[in-house]
Amino acid sequence: MTNTLTLQDKVAFIQGGSRGIGAAVAKRLAREGAAVALTYSQSPDAAQAVVQSIEAAGGRALAIKADSADADAIRGAIRQAAEAFGRLDILVNNAGVLAIAPIEEFALEDLDRTLAINVRSVVIASQEAALHMGNGGRIIQIGSTNADRMPFAGGAVYAMSKSALVGLTKGLARDLGPRGITVNNVQPGPVDTDMNPANSDFAESLKQLMAVGRYGQVEEIASFVAYLSGPEAGYITGANLLIDGGFSA
Ligand SMILES: NC(=O)c1ccc[n+]([C@@H]2O[C@H](COP(=O)([O-])OP(=O)(O)OC[C@H]3O[C@@H](n4cnc5c(N)ncnc54)[C@H](OP(=O)(O)O)[C@@H]3O)[C@@H](O)[C@H]2O)c1
């Protein structure tokens, strides 16, 4: 029988794949045939559960503890994944943190941590991944619609961190396009996860701002990432792509 899986024989590395959007991306890419390595920093059990779910469905997966604030840990994890699975085709930079506070009170350590995880880790992982990828490689950031629209107070630093990915993605696309590697930035709107649960007062206020009036589900983001990871998306690069239920409309 002909194999029709779009990511058959591909290897994906997901920075921050234990929970939320990253876990859904890991499972979806595995369902499309990719072997998947995923990192975590705090949640070994959740990461292992993602691996088990992929393996139970007949896929290949590996969880690696690597704090995205630690450059050596990121590089080491990517090397470990490429060695374990023999190649690297897809990098998804999903790890992210959200610190909300009025600017007058915003802690310096939260500023540094946000920039380290949401921005610096994306540069470092892309750098290391580019050493292992060949023609057809894919780098996908999980940015945010907040790069375009920040309708509540206290999110200035988070919005700045996600805006940084807009320029980074364009520049990386220029660097890596000649090698057949695409680089794109997926910008979700509110998605129901631990970071942003859909059943809070805050969530109710955000739903009022959206064309569809509801939160997104992690699987909706994962299917978009799977499309961008696949062979049909080779002409999309340097793009900042909203998937936000009309949050920015
Ligand atoms: N949910 C939303 O509404 C929304 C909207 C737009 C964009 N986003 C972005 O989407 C991405 C995922 O968000 P989410 O809602 O799925 O968040 P989440 O539920 O809090 O999950 C975050 C994931 O990132 C990992 N992570 C966090 N800090 C890390 C670190 N220092 N090192 C390694 N991994 C780390 C976590 O691993 P551990 O379990 O080990 O901590 C976890 O797997 C983030 O970049 C976020 O900014 C989310």
Image (cartoon, rainbow, N blue to C red):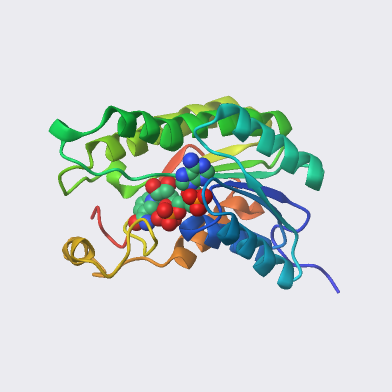
Residue 239: quarter of image: top left
Q: Residue at x 63, y 37 (%)?
A: 181
**Is residue 94 visible in this depiction of the protein?**
no
Residue 189 location, x and y as percent? 32, 56
Q: Left of 194 or right of it: where is 86? A: right
Residue sitting at x 72%, y 37%: 135
Which image quarter holds the C terminus?
bottom left
> In the image, 212: left or right of 32?
left
Asked if 90 appears above or below 220 in the picture, the reply is above
* Residue 99 horizontal/vertical position (percent): 29, 43
Looking at the picture, tell me which residue is in the foreground, 137 or 83: 83
- Residue nearer the viewer, 86 or 138: 86
**Residue shown at the point (52%, 37%) measured from the top left:** 68
Up-down relation of residue 59 to residue 62 (above or below): below
Question: Is 96 displayed left or right of 32 in the figure?
Answer: left
Quarter where residue 55 is shown:
bottom right
Q: Picture coordinates of residue 213 (x, y %)?
A: 23, 70
Counting every numbered tag in the picture gives 0
Q: Residue at x 59, y 40 (%)?
A: 66
Whether residue 80 appears in this view of the structure is yes
Relative placement, left or right, of 147 versus 168 is left
- The part of the image, by quadrant, that contains residue 203 is bottom left
Q: Quadrant of the N terminus?
A: bottom right
